[in-house]
Amino acid sequence: MKIKVSLVILLISSLYGCNDPSEQVEVRIEPDFYENPWTNEIQDRSLIIVTSLTDNSIEIQNISINRGGCSSQMTQGAKILSRYGSYTKFLLPNCDISMVKEAQLKLNNLEYFYNF
């Protein structure tokens, strides 16, 4: 029994402080408003913003919104988040902000799911 308890404590302590990339980025959805240059009307669109919360470099290898049901286009930033606070914006041209339920990201060769 003492060996089992010791192994559990050792396992928990070895996991403490692990750098999980899913906790090193913030993923959020935001509305974005812009002026249509042809009509001068204010229009809205939806964005996914991925922000680094670590000093380590994080590569965004893929992003899938609603299991591929919403397309995404990188509009600002880079695929490599090189420092704390760096971010990348993805435009969702065929999805309203209220339709977004899930984002799947491939970061540094590992996949992570974010639910909204």
Image (cartoon, rainbow, N blue to C red):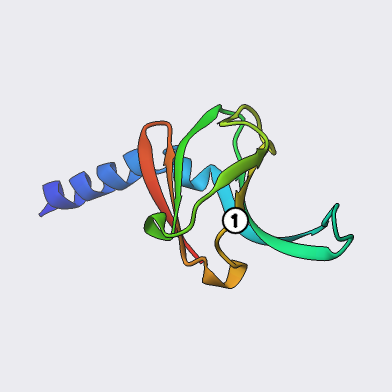
In the image, 47 versus 39, the foreground residue is 39
Query: Would residue 93 be found to the left or right of residue 11 on screen?
Result: right
Can residue 52 be seen in this snapshot?
no
Query: Residue 43, image x and y in percent?
Result: 78, 64
Query: Residue 102, image x and y in percent?
Result: 45, 61
The vertical placement of 35 against 116, above or below, is above
The vertical placement of 78 against 20, above or below, is above
In the image, 71 versus 6, the foreground residue is 71
Callout 1: 10 Å neighbours few (<14), some, many (20+)? few
The vertical placement of 89 against 114, above or below, is above
Query: Would residue 99 be found to the left or right of residue 75 on screen?
Result: left
Q: Which residue is at 55% across, 60% downward?
A: 94
The number of callouts visible is: 1
- Image quadrant occupied by the N terminus: bottom left
Query: Residue 32, image x and y in percent?
Result: 74, 59
Q: Which residue is at 62% across, 27% downward?
A: 82
* Residue 10 placement: quadrant: top left
Q: Which residue is mark 1?
A: 93
- Callout 1 amino acid: Pro
Please identify the residue farthest to the bottom as the structure is shown: 98
